[in-house]
Image: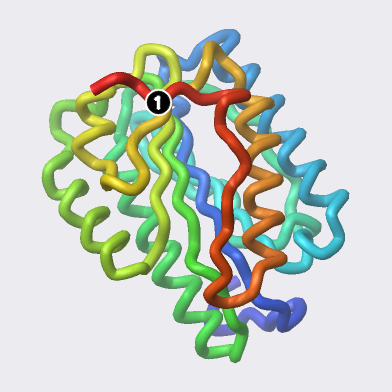
Amino acid sequence: MEYGLESPINYEQKCLCVLVVDTSGSMQGTPIDELNQGLQLFHQDISNNFSTAQRLEICLIEFNSQVDCIVEPSLIDHFDMPILAVAGTTKLVDGVRLAMHKVQERKQWYRSTGQPYYRPWIILMTDGAPDKDQDIQGLAQELQSGVVNKQFTFFPIGVQGADLNMLRRISTPDRPPMMLQGLRFEAFFDWLSASLAMVASSTDGQVINLPPTSGWGILPVS
């Protein structure tokens, strides 16, 4: 359904989280299995929190040799979390750019339908380097502009084998890249659901101290 024709399910203040996940061939085997388990548990955690389920919208974008938005922005009760499969290479820049487009598109729909909203989150999870034709410098500038202008918050997460230098280039000083400990996707998504529940229950201007990342993340040494 086109956003212009979509009617709000409710008029609660919305919190959009766009997950941009790497499903290239290097995620084959245990990594993609752990990612899928984490996504399923994340869906269940949000479903079990009535207040958050009324406010949190999830968008899921995968990138490999192509980029696909496989879950359009939706409240958790209005979609089933898909099972991801791996294929091909790493169109990372195209995936993140699609996420930024979805954020702007959804915010426009919120405004046009009179729904208040929190600043959206974009979360990138990748285990490798982007394809050589990908415009990392251009993406870095676009992300910097978007974060500085408070259009969204960007979280870059590296999985085993991730290109940390690239992640540092596209990150911002307030959110440096984090490395996933091993393949602790479930712990990451536990943290994410708890963090988003805090955001979705907050008031405008409230300072939010997110839960510690020590259970899943490592801040790499520069």
Q: Residue at x 37, y 54 (%)?
A: 98
Return the residue at label 1.
Answer: 219
Q: Left of 89 or right of it: where is 50? A: right
Depth check: 126 or 116 in front? 116
Q: Residue at x 47, y 16 (%)?
A: 27
Q: Amino acid at mark 1?
A: Leu
How many marks overall? 1
**Rendered position, 134 above or below 50:** above
Quadrant for residue 221, please give it.
top left
Q: Quadrant of the C terminus?
A: top left
SS at circle 1: loop
Percent coordinates x, y for residue 194 in the rendering: 70, 46
Percent coordinates x, y for residue 200 in the rendering: 67, 64
Coloration of the structure image: rainbow
Q: Residue at x 30, y 35 (%)?
A: 91
Depth check: 125 or 178 in front? 178
Depth check: 102 or 64 in front? 102
Q: Left of 178 or right of it: where is 145? A: left
On the question of residue 2 being in view, the answer is: no
Quadrant for residue 74, please give it.
bottom right
Depth check: 60 or 89 in front? 60
On the question of residue 212 being in view, the answer is: yes
**Rendered position, 161 above or below 146:** above
Q: Residue at x 52, y 45 (%)?
A: 19
**Rendered position, 61 above or below 87:** below
Percent coordinates x, y for residue 1 in the rendering: 60, 71
Percent coordinates x, y for residue 70 in the rendering: 56, 47
Q: Left of 201 or right of it: where is 150? A: left
